[in-house]
Amino acid sequence: MHQARSAPVTVDDDDLLLGRYRLLSRLGEGGMGVVWLAEDTRLHRRVAVKRIGGGAEVGGPKRAGREAVAAARLAHPAVVALYEAGQAEDGDWILVCELVRGPTLQVLMRDGALSDRDVAEIGIALCDALEHAHSRGVVHRDIKPANVICPDASDEAGAVAKLTDFGVARLAGDDTLTRTGDVLGTLTYMAPEQARGRAAGPPADVYALGIVLYEALAGVNPRRGANAAETARLVDVDITPLERVRRDLPEELCAAIDRAVAVDPRARQKPGALRAALRRAIPDLDDEPGLITGGAMETVTHVLRAGTRFARDVTQVAHGRWQPGDEMPVHAAGVLDPQDAPPRRTTAVPARAGAAALAGLLVAGALSWARPEGMPSPWLLAIGAACAVLLLPRLGWLITACGVVGAVALREPGTAILLGAMLAPVPLLVPRAGTAWSVPVLAPLLGLAGLAGAFPALAGQARGVAVRAGLGALGAWWVLLAAVPLETALYLGDGAGAWTGTTSAAADVLADVVSSGAVALVAIWAIAAALLPVLVRGWNAAADIAAATGWAAGTAAATDGVATALALPRPHGLVAGAVVAGVVAVVARAVADPPR
């Protein structure tokens, strides 16, 4: 086996490895060696030194040699660079690598710190790394989240992810591993052919990357069983299609990842094809981080299925079909099958509770304003609506909206028309953000306090550019339509005149909003909400304050300029709303958990 070897390691009186590297502190363990933070005394830079003890495990030095040879062939922004390698007289290998500051993908996945878009961008970087490695005859053979480092954005200007640890890489033409029958790698990410001890070529890396992406998007590793034996049994089992686990993801992306994890290596695409699918999917992916957990109904289903299997296993034990010394049935041991109810990205309980509260407030306000004859207490109906939205955010909201519009129509048909015009665009503009469908009600409420201009800052906290833009547009639309029935100047307009609640009056309001040009506020708020997270990044307090101030002032100036150009009344509470918007933008970003 060819090895990139320098002169033997020497340690002088100053404890310099290879005559130039001073160990500073232990960073941890990686692969088969201990990783140290070190200083290159010649180039005056920090590096990572991996020291692999020759007696740590059979084949340890050979693995280090493979890592050195493999990594030396590679020079790519998405691959951790190897600077130097050498072997000590006692058999220890010294690998001097690029120091990358940042968490591993494993840590980010564990902490729920990645958005769907983050996962896609990391996948693109890893596809680039694999294309580069495969073109140079290097197969990684141990791709897993722990071997992917995501550089801190403040420290690195290169790739968003770097692949490291080529310790089990198989070089083209080097059949040592397959000849000796070694099976190296991590079983839960290992391609079926590799797990069976067969030759593992580039398709094995594609498979492992597909499993990593599947796990990052679905929240569960489809190859991980309750124990090693069950994991081994899952090697040749077809994996549940990602589309069934995450129905909100683009169909093409799911199909690409499903193809990457095909059992037959001939069915897997090359890294470039997977990269193209990831790139095309990015505009449609959520860009805010969050844990991936099962929904309420999925949890119930999971428990019921687990209970059924537990009862089955207990029956098996009771009837003597399990003998002492046999492997305990998985479910009788109290372990839930990860395939029972594949999780999907859902909204946390606080978000559902907030959506329910806003929906109840909307129902109470609308029915108190135009309470039909013979209807129960508006607050009683509001509680029912809140419960419906809490359990089923989208369906509950739609049923509630239709019921409220129908009830109001019995008393004031004109008000029902305006209410319907406010509610109808919501599921169309933000179809996937069910828990945010009642958020636009905050815009008129802020308007009543003279702070309507602060709403874009609230809309700007939503996940996804499309959702933020949609909520911003809806908030402006609600403010414009609600001003006349409320007979109050919420933002644009003076709110003068008595509201009659007739159909003709509603038609006049809609026509006036469109013909006067006031609808331009919809575009301004949509753009402002969409851009907010791009400007206020959460990386530096001073920069955030400056960016939020400029953003709030720019939004207010644009609104004032449009109002002046269209001869509309000056926006109500323009300055106060801008100040509150800036404060909300900074505070919300400061308390949020950033992706990195």
Image (tube, rainbow, N blue to C red):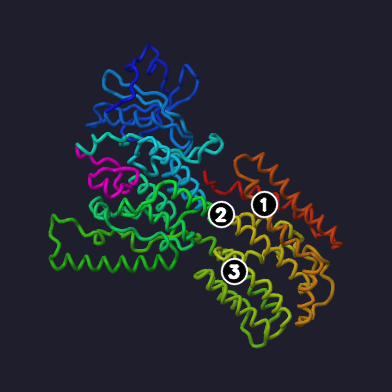
Task: Kindly report which numbered mark, 3 or 2, lies closer to the viewer in this rendering.
Answer: 2
Disc 1 + disc 2, Cβ < 8 Å: no
Residue at horizontal 68 percent and vertical 62 percent from the top: 473
Gap in Å between the C-alphas at discs 1 and 2? 26 Å
Task: Kindly report which numbered mark, 1 or 2, lies closer to the viewer in this rendering.
Answer: 2
Residue 517 screen position, x and y as percent: 80, 64
- Within the magenta stretch, is there residue 184? yes
Residue at horizontal 44 percent and vertical 43 percent from the top: 126
**Residue 595, placed above or below residue 334:** above
Residue nearest the observer in this picture, 23 or 75: 75
Say which mark, if any, is on residue 584: 1
- Within the magenta stretch, is there residue 350? no
Location of mark 2 (residue): 283
Location of mark 3 (residue): 427
Quarter of the N terminus within the rendering: top left
Q: Which quadrant of the figure has residue 577?
A: bottom right
Mark 1 or mark 2: whose residue is earlier in sequence: 2
Question: As drawn, which residue projects farthest toward the right?
Answer: 567
Say which mark, if any, is on residue 249: none
Task: Kindly report which numbered mark, 3 or 1, lies closer to the viewer in this rendering.
Answer: 3
Q: Which residues are magenta?
A: 180-203
Q: Is residue 277 left or right of residue 196?
A: right
Give the amino acid type for the residue marked by disc 3 in the picture.
Answer: Pro
Residue at horizontal 75 percent and vertical 61 percent from the top: 521
Residue 170 screen position, x and y as percent: 30, 36
Circle 3: is it few (<14), some (14-19), or many (20+) Cα within 10 Å?
A: some
Give the amino acid type for the residue marked by disc 1 in the picture.
Answer: Val
Residue 245 screen position, x and y as percent: 41, 61
Q: Is residue 36 left or right of residue 250?
A: left
Mark 3 or mark 1: whose residue is earlier in sequence: 3
